Image (spheres, rainbow, N blue to C red):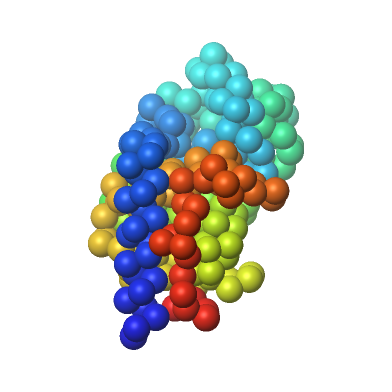
């Protein structure tokens, strides 16, 4: 119990520090739930700047107005448009898999999909080819405003270096830690994840810049021997 309380306080302290330094991040970039879903799939294994180029191509071709637009387009043409995002043939198939799922179960209606409870919605999204836990939870949090915490490589790296996590802690365990420690609030989860990503990109790289990191100092390190 003592370890749980200590880490709970530390996670909130980290959040408050990052928010004070960076302010609100206003994530996820996207005008509609469909655009956010497409962005979540395209951002796998690539930088967001590349995803933005692909999104612009799709918008110019008027393919993000409704899911039916993506349903009609041929996979080869779709792959060409999203080429800047990398792995374009694979990602075109993944986008098509999502659209086919939406078509077969929800008549291409994101509104119908959004009516599902969070547990069932998560379970169903994870059955779609190419949608793993991180992509699924990004869709849930950002496109559907569900209070579920997104765990990514930056989360793992930062909290391992700050001794909150053990090496190679599993996705589900890390997510559970956050969701038990923090108030169940989609806005908080949104901001926290965005702040972690920014800190990871700017400071907690593979070769970390600890001296200038906003989380430097013993106040942001766990004294526990292991995670929750």
The answer to whether 170 appears left or right of 31 in the picture is right
Give the camera-side residue of 122 and 109. Answer: 122
User: Could one spot residue 135 in this view of the protein?
Assistant: yes
Residue 168 location, quadrant: bottom right
How far across and how far down the image is residue 24, in percent?
33, 36
The answer to whether 8 appears left or right of 131 in the picture is left
Q: Is residue 77 above or below residue 14?
A: above
Quadrant (top left/top right/bottom left/bottom right) for the N terminus = bottom left
The answer to whether 198 appears left or right of 25 in the picture is right
Q: Residue at x 43, y 31 (%)?
A: 29
Give the camera-side residue of 77 and 219. Answer: 219
Q: Residue at x 46, y 75 (%)?
A: 223
How far across and how far down the image is residue 177, in percent?
41, 70
Give the camera-side residue of 138 and 104. Answer: 138
Q: Residue at x 66, y 38 (%)?
A: 46
Give the tally of numbered discs. 0
Q: Residue furthest bottom?
A: 1
User: Could one spot residue 110 in this view of the protein?
Assistant: no
How far across and how far down the image is residue 76, in percent?
72, 29
Give the camera-side residue of 182 and 81. Answer: 182
How far across and how far down the image is residue 10, in percent?
37, 65
Q: Residue furthest top?
A: 60
Quadrant (top left/top right/bottom left/bottom right) for the C terminus = bottom left
């Amino acid at each position: 119990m003592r370890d749980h309380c200590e880490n709970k306080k530390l996670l909130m302290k980290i959040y408050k520090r990052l928010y004070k330094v960076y302010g609100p991040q206003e994530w996820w970039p996207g005008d509609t739930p469909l655009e956010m879903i497409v962005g979540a799939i395209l951002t796998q294994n690539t930088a967001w700047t590349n995803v933005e180029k692909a999104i612009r191509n799709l918008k110019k071709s008027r393919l993000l107005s409704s899911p039916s637009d993506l349903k009609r387009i041929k996979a080869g043409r779709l792959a060409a448009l999203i080429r800047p995002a990398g792995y374009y043939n694979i990602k075109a198939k993944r986008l098509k898999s999502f659209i086919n799922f939406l078509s077969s179960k929800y008549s291409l209606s994101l509104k119908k999909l959004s009516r599902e409870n969070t547990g069932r919605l998560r379970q169903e999204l994870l059955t779609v080819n190419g949608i793993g836990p991180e992509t699924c939870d990004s869709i849930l949090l950002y496109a559907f405003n569900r209070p579920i915490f997104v765990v990514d490589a930056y989360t793992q790296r930062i909290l391992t270096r700050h001794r909150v996590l053990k090496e190679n802690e599993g996705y589900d365990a890390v997510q559970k830690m956050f969701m038990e420690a923090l108030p169940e609030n989609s806005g908080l989860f949104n901001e926290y994840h965005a702040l972690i990503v920014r800190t990871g990109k700017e400071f907690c790289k593979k070769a970390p810049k600890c001296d200038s990191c906003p989380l430097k100092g013993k106040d942001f390190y766990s004294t526990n021997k292991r995670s929750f």
